[in-house]
Amino acid sequence: MDDATFQGLRRRMEIFREVQAKPPKPEWTPPRLEDFQWRVPVQAIDQNLTNTGVIRLRIVGYGTTDVLFRETIKPEPAWPLDGFSDMFERAYLLRNELVSRLVSMDTVIETPAVQGYHRDSSLLAAQACWDAVRGLSWGTRASLVSKQHVGKILCNDPKASKAQIKAAVCRYIPEAAKSTDGWNEHTRDAVAIALTRLYDLKREMTGG
């Protein structure tokens, strides 16, 4: 094989590899405010038997996110209990506290954990939240969202850390960086759940 033929074959192989090569994935960028559903208030619950964060918010325009309500509910039995008795009582108290605070609107609850040491308590907390929401007026929509989905949407990381979630929330609500005025990791996690719900809702409504 002469050199011209060899170089021709080599060039054809290079072209073949270029055609077969997959284009690089575009660099991930955080969702913009316009990527979320606007003017639809949403209620979110970061469920836990000891500290449950509750948030109501809506996005009303570019750069404007209204936090309508925020609170951390801390169910505490009136007397010492152990094991399941303690968990059952906290779940009962959590449901009652939520009933007095929730309003009728689109509500999203963190999915109970499926791994780790707190699966039982997480399931009981989620059930208490679901019961409280379903006890609202007819037509109130209840849904679930996993923390993995929240991390994927807001941080591009299904295993996002608390620090990553905090940074993501503060991107849209700078005041959430505070540790006063009702802001803490539980209310920030609830905001992250609410934002993820609005992100998904935008795609439901637009078919995107």
Image (cartoon, rainbow, N blue to C red):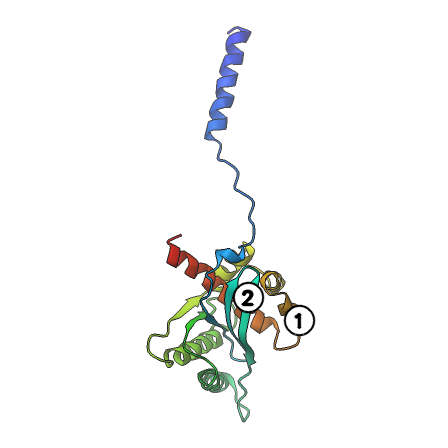
Decide: few, some or many residues near mark 1? Use Cα within 10 Å; few <14, some 14-19, many ≥20: few
Q: Is 35 located above or below residue 106 in the figure?
A: above
**Does residue 51 show up?**
no
Q: Is 75 located above or below residue 202 in the figure?
A: below
Q: Position of residue 12 (x, y in %)?
A: 48, 18
Q: Position of residue 108 (x, y in %)?
A: 44, 70
Q: Is residue 76 left or right of residue 203?
A: right
Q: Is 110 located above or below residue 160 in the figure?
A: below
Q: Is residue 156 left or right of residue 136?
A: right
Q: Which sits in the foreground, 106 or 149?
A: 106
Q: Quadrant of residue 64?
A: bottom right
Decide: few, some or many residues near mark 2? Use Cα within 10 Å; few <14, some 14-19, many ≥20: some
Number of the front mark, 1 or 2: 2
Q: Earlier in the sequence, mark 1 or mark 2?
A: 2
Q: Position of residue 19 (x, y in %)?
A: 46, 28
Residue 65: mark in rendering: 2
**Marks 1 & 2, CB-CB < 8 Å contact:** no
> Could you tell me how far apart the alpha carbons at marks 1 and 2 are, in whole angstroms?
16 Å
Q: Amino acid at mark 2?
A: Thr
Q: Is residue 208 left or right of residue 172?
A: left
Residue 178: mark in rendering: 1
